[in-house]
Image: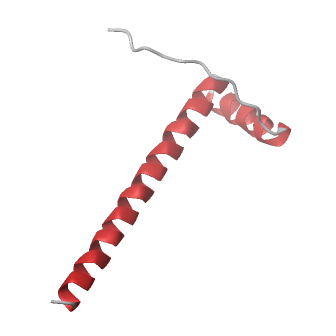
Amino acid sequence: MTIATRTFTVQLAVRLAEERDARAGLLACPRRWIAKEALIGYLAREKEKRRRIREGLDDVARQYGTCHD
């Protein structure tokens, strides 16, 4: 089964591109893999951040609900 994919282009600061290139060389993997992994990690961290914020808001709502009963 083939997964549908999309290609996008991004401009990087020269220093960041050089760091990506160096990391790809150290890991012996394509530069696109480095970029893909970075995006996957970023999206996972953002999802976790939103989950924790919702959890915190739920805790606050429970506390205020308990205090005003």
Location of residue 10 by image quarter: top right
Q: Residue furthest left?
A: 69
Tally the numbered discs: 0
Between 40 and 47, the one lying in front of the other is 47
* Left or right of 27 on screen, residue 66: left
Q: Residue 24 versus residue 43: which sits nearer the camera?
A: 43
Give percent across and percent down for residue 31.
66, 26
Residue at 84 percent of width and 37 percent of height: 14
18 vs 33, left or right, is right
Q: Residue furthest top?
A: 1
Instruction: Name which quarter of the figure residue 53 lies in.
Output: bottom left
Residue 20 point in image, percent of width and height: 71, 35
Question: Which residue is outermost to the front?
Answer: 68
Residue at figure coordinates x 28%, y 70% from the top left: 58
For residue 43, above or below residue 55: above
Query: Coloured how?
Result: secondary structure
* Quarter of the rendering occupied by the N terminus: top left
Q: In this rendering, is residue 15 above or below 62?
A: above
Q: Residue at x 23, y 78 (%)?
A: 62
Q: Quadrant of the C terminus?
A: bottom left
Residue depicted at 39% across the width and 14% down the height: 3
Residue 25 rendering spot, x and y as whole percentages: 70, 29
Left or right: 41 as drawn, with respect to 29? left
